């Protein structure tokens, strides 16, 4: 609801009250409702005269008083100390209106402005009522005062119909003229492009020849100028003798003028001036009334800006300022209609930033946001004025090309890819940008949503074909979608089947002592041999599992099978090496994780210490909630060990190492791959190793693929490792075949590939 | 918890009590009954069966029981054990003194045994046909204060819109607000969700009188409304078709904490205005709202999750649902039984009772607490 409307309703409600108590009570309740405050009070002369929201509870009188003295919070039953605000009331004398609201959010400047205006209205109504009650005689002045209040109700009511700003400001100017009995009224606003000047945006009673002289003027002139610079009501009772007043008005024999500042959410933006050709003296009541009209104008300006902003906000993406999905679809529908009429073609490009999640997770949201802004800018730079680029949230952008052939659209897609290719420098860091683009033409679809979906499908194809490219939609992509759905249900079935029957199997990659090459542990990895399609890449079936919400079930199945295998090896070969099992973010978020792990351990009958759960560094770096940390602590409590996987790829703090009960770090392959060539990488690994030593952690190097890497790692004292050079992942049976023997390749022999 | 489809009050009372009163130490019996059942006889027999246990209840526009919604039936749920303390009071002649009636119904919170409990909630069942229910909430809030949440709904009469009934202890009343102050050792959980989504751009209510909207964005309200929504042509010419269409497309008024939903009851085809169930202030910023089975059911899930999450890890003992009759309109017969399935998927085998309301009450923040088109879920632990 707009502030002006709330204020008009407020005035109507308090004016309708019969006595001072009910005026204050109604004022308190309506003010609290307007800002959704839970509690409030009217404090008179240091005493909480009435309260709201404390029910039968003891009223915290001292704390409410403290708010009047400047404290920013007050207690709310059930919510504790919460943001609070006190507004001065001029009547009753020495009183305040106090409100407090549960939750962390302070009152906004708009809410403060509204409450201030409400407090002033309440004071005026109470003052009118008091005068009447005290004097007990209805002389002309008092009747006038009462009538003024009635007129005020009418005028404010007519202000608040949500009309265009110009109309609202005209009504305010007219109301001020009528209520204050002044012939001349002017509302001036400081120019946005030149703050030293003001424009008269609404006026009353200024003759045409004079208007030309005063329509645009220097900001400091006249009563209005003084009100702006001193931020208070200025009353000039002798206009002609005041040198600071405006010459043109003086020449027209203006007798007196009064002005009040107008603000937009606390910043002074102009002034409201009333003036008369009749001599006289401005009273306090008249000053109050003018202030009230000025506040009305202030609220109307804020409202107008907010409505404009809200409309813009509803249709645009906050981050990039580009149209959002709603506006994009609207434009798309319209251009489809136009294209239908003109026998033209419309093209839609669906553009997804490659690996964006990785950037966001590893480098933080601010870097991710800056990257998205850069992408939006570059896409925009590749388009004609008539085309539309939009952001749909996340890393998804769309482009609408009006009246475009497929050839032209493909050229735009190529231009966008080329424009993104140089990468971007964000916060001093050079980031590669890639995108996958799907293109669909209006010949394929009649509805905007449908066309967009087709472009989306084509984008997925571009991603599947290796990213950094574009693909044009073809109807066959639909059937691919269906295949994907089949894959989902087959994966679901594979997870549900028992060990022997399932085509989902586990392989084990040995983790070795880098010096003796003795077997220390194995990492269990899932493989899916599809009955028709053969071996499915782990990356693909993990994606399928994620999209189908199967990650928890998949993880649980792997965990149980791995634990059972550990038991088999113990029974058959007295082998008690560590069994490493990967735990996904989805499992970590799942409340059943602890039960699942305990169940798997108990079912297999293994020592919990034999199980090591691997959690990816990117997962623990995202704010693992308290619940997830508690789960890890609980697992630690029963003896299970924890390793951080892919360690060293994250850039932010290592605070999680203190927060989480970690036993081992697995050094990411990206750190290991150049360790024999790059002294910088070797130094990095050395630092990581000494960090591990300090924290008492086992350090395992991943991805050792050459004898040189192995040597280098030995040299810096890394004790454990895994990788193709040492031993590829193998089935349980294969592993058993070489069990008593040595696992690693001798150091001086070439690596088998 | 027990339910019965008998319309004979005595039989219905015996049937619901047979399972609802298993508890040895009942503290409050809550009953929701269609007025197809003889409510006087029902209450008399409930009193006979329940001894001195406090009773609170009301008539409905459909009942919510495990397994699905019912019509023309009776459902009761009993809170029992020394974990609970309960007191009841009533506010009479509510339509002439809405605020005072709300305060009267909240007076039960002054009960010493209730006050002694760590957690409290005030259950309110009101006559929604009797005037602005926000006034009732204001009156109750003046007594309850910010520390005690308010929850409940307005009684129904199977959509006859003539007369609703409130029950407390030995009395069947109309034009009343009945209140039960419930104190508990364990926390209460309250979930409030509506499940409507904004469609398109915001708009201004440029002219309105009370609950009637005359113009939107300076165009005749009916035409502006239909144009925005891509409505079927007959909705602009046939009043019944309009009402059917409007049932699933209410107005959302922008408030600090989100939207306040206004159900659109009908249109005046001559002057092109539209009429809502509660007031729509002139000058308000509004959105058209759209709901479908998916979004309404998602709100059901959300309300249940919110309510259960507030139990701080305690297991729920019972769940009471106050569900707007208009949501039933959106979901249809099939959807509405899916809604109850959704509720049960969260609450499991915990006793569940509720009814279809003419307005919902839930005050957990701010001072406003009267809702339209909303599902309110109270979880008791």
Image: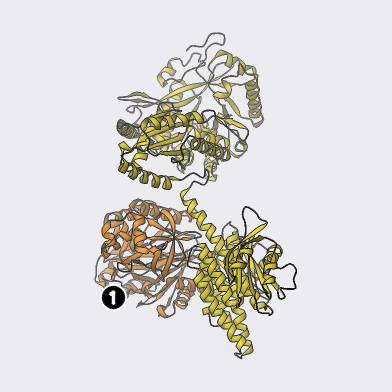
Chain colours: A yellow, B orange
- Observer-nearest residue: A32 or B34? A32
Q: In this picture, is B90 found above or below A463?
A: below
Q: In this picture, is A107 found above or below A598?
A: below
| Residue A603, quarter of the rendered image | top left
| Residue A44, quarter of the rendered image | bottom right
Give the image location of residue A474, x and y in percent. 32, 31
Residue B24 visible somewhere in the drawing? no
Residue A369 visible somewhere in the drawing? yes
Give the image location of residue B155, x and y in percent. 35, 70
- Observer-nearest residue: B217 or B377? B217
Q: Residue furthest front?
A: A209
Give the image location of residue A686, x and y in percent. 65, 23
Figure label count = 1
| Residue A301, quarter of the rendered image | bottom right
Q: To which residue does mark 1 refer?
A: B41
Q: Is residue B244 left or right of residue A468?
A: left
SS label for mark 1: helix
Give the image location of residue B313, x and y in percent. 48, 52
Q: Is residue A678 left or right of residue B58?
A: right
Q: Residue furthest top?
A: A749
Q: In this picture, is A270 found above or below A97?
A: above
């Amino acid at each position: 609801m707009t502030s002006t409307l709330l204020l008009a309703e407020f005035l109507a409600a308090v004016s309708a009250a019969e006595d001072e108590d009910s005026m204050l009570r109604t004022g308190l309740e309506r003010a609290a409702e307007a800002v959704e405050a839970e509690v409030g009070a009217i404090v008179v002369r240091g005493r909480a005269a009435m309260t709201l929201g404390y029910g039968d509870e003891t009223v915290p009188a001292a704390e409410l008083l403290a708010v009047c003295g400047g404290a920013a919070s007050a207690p709310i039953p059930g919510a504790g100390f919460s943001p609070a605000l006190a507004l001065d009331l001029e009547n009753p004398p020495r009183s305040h209106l106090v409100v407090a609201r549960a939750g962390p959010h302070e009152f906004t400047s708009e809410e403060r402005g509204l409450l201030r205006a409400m407090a002033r209205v309440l004071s005026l109504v109470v003052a009118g009522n008091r005068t009447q009650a005290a004097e007990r005689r209805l002389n002309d002045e008092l009747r006038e005062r009462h009538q003024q209040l009635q007129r005020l109700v009418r005028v404010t009511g007519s202000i608040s119909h949500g009309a265009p700003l110009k109309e609202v400001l005209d009504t305010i100017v007219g109301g001020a003229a009528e209520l204050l009995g002044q012939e001349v009224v002017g509302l001036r606003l400081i120019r946005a492009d030149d703050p030293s000047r003001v424009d008269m945006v609404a006026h009353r009673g200024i003759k045409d020849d004079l208007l030309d002289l005063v329509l645009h003027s220097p900001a400091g002139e006249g009563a209005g100028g003084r009100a702006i610079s001193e931020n208070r009501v200025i009353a000039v009772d002798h206009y002609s003798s005041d040198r600071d007043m405006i010459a043109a008005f003086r020449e027209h024999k203006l007798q007196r003028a009064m002005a009040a500042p107008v603000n937009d959410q606390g910043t002074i933006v102009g002034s409201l001036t009333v003036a008369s050709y009749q001599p006289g003296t401005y009273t306090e009541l008249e000053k109050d009334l003018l202030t009230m009209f000025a506040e009305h104008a202030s609220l109307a300006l804020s409202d107008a800006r907010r409505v404009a902003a809200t409309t813009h906000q509803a249709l645009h993406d906050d981050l990039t300022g580009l149209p959002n999905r709603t506006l994009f679809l609207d434009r798309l529908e319209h251009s489809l209609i136009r294209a239908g009429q003109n026998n033209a073609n419309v093209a839609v490009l669906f553009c997804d930033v490659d690996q964006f999640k990785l950037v966001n997770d590893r480098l933080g949201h601010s870097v991710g946001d800056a990257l998205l802004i850069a992408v939006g800018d570059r896409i925009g730079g590749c388009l004609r004025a008539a085309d539309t680029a939009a952001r749909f949230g996340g890393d998804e952008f769309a482009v609408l090309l009006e009246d475009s052939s497929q050839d032209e659209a493909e050229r735009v897609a190529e231009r966008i890819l080329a424009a993104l290719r140089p990468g971007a420098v964000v916060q001093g860091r050079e980031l590669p940008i890639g995108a996958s683009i799907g293109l669909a033409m209006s010949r394929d679809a009649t509805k905007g949503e449908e066309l967009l979906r087709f472009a989306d499908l084509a984008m997925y194809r571009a991603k599947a074909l290796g990213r950094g490219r574009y693909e044009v939609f073809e109807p066959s992509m639909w059937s691919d979608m269906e295949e994907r759905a089949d894959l989902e249900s087959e994966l679901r079935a594979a997870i549900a089947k028992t060990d022997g029957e399932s085509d989902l199997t586990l392989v084990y990659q040995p983790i070795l002592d880098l010096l003796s090459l003795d077997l220390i542990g194995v990492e269990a990895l899932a493989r899916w041999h599809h009955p028709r399609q053969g071996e499915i890449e782990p990356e693909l079936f993990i994606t399928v599992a994620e999209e189908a919400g199967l990650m928890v079930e998949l993880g649980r199945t792997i965990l149980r099978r791995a634990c059972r295998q550990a038991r088999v090896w113990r029974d058959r070969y007295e082998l008690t090496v560590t069994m490493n099992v990967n735990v996904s973010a989805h499992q970590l978020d799942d409340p059943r994780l602890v039960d699942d792990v305990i169940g798997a351990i108990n079912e297999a009958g293994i020592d919990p210490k034999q199980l090591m759960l691997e959690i990816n560094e990117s997962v623990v770096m995202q704010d693992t909630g308290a619940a997830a940390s508690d789960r890890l602590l609980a697992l630690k409590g029963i003896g299970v060990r924890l390793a951080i996987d892919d360690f060293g790829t994250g850039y932010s703090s290592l605070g999680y190492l203190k927060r989480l009960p970690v036993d081992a770090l697995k050094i990411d392959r990206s750190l290991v791959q150049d360790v024999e060539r790059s002294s910088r990488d070797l130094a990095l690994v050395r630092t990581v190793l000494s960090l591990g030593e300090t924290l008492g952690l086992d350090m395992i190097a991943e991805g050792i693929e050459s004898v040189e890497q192995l040597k280098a790692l030995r040299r810096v004292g890394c004790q454990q490792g895994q990788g193709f050079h040492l031993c590829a992942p193998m089935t349980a049976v294969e592993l058993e075949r070489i069990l008593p023997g040595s696992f690693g390749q001798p150091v001086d022999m070439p690596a088998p590939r | 918890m027990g339910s019965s489809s008998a319309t004979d009050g005595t039989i219905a009372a015996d049937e619901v009590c047979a399972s609802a009163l298993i508890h040895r130490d009942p503290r409050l019996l809550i009953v929701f009954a269609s007025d197809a059942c003889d409510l006087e006889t029902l209450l008399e027999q409930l009193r006979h069966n329940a001894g001195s246990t406090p009773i609170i209840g009301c008539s409905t526009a459909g009942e919510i029981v495990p397994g699905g919604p019912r019509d023309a039936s009776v459902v009761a749920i009993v809170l029992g054990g020394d974990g609970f303390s309960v007191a009841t009071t009533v506010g009479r002649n509510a339509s002439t003194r809405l605020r005072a009636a709300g305060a009267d119904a909240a007076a039960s919170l002054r009960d010493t045994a209730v006050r002694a409990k760590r957690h409290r909630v005030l259950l309110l069942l009101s006559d929604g046909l009797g005037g602005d229910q926000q006034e009732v909430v204001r009156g109750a809030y003046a007594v309850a204060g910010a520390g005690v949440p308010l929850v409940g709904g307005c009684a129904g009469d199977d959509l006859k819109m003539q007369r609703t009934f409130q029950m407390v202890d030995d009395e069947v009343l109309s034009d009343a607000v009945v209140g039960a102050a419930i104190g508990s050792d364990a926390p209460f959980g309250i979930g409030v969700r509506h499940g409507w989504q904004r469609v398109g751009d915001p708009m201004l209510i440029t002219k309105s009188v009370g609950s009637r909207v005359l113009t939107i964005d300076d165009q005749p309200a009916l035409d502006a409304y239909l144009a925005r929504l891509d409505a079927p042509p007959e909705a602009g010419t046939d009043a019944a078709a309009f009402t059917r269409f409007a049932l699933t497309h209410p107005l959302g008024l922008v408030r600090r904490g989100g939207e306040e939903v206004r159900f659109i009851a009908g249109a005046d085809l001559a002057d092109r205005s539209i009429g809502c169930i509660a007031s729509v202030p002139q000058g308000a910023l509004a959105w058209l709202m759209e709901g479908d089975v998916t979004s309404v059911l998602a709100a059901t899930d959300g309300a249940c999750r919110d309510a259960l999450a507030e139990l701080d890890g305690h297991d729920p003992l019972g769940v009471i649902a106050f569900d707007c009759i208009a949501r039933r309109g959106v979901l249809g017969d099939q959807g509405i039984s899916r809604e109850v399935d959704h509720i049960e998927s969260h609450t499991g085998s915990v006793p569940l009772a509720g009814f279809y309301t003419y307005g919902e009450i839930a005050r957990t923040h701010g001072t406003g607490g009267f809702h339209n088109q909303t599902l309110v879920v109270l979880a008791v632990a």
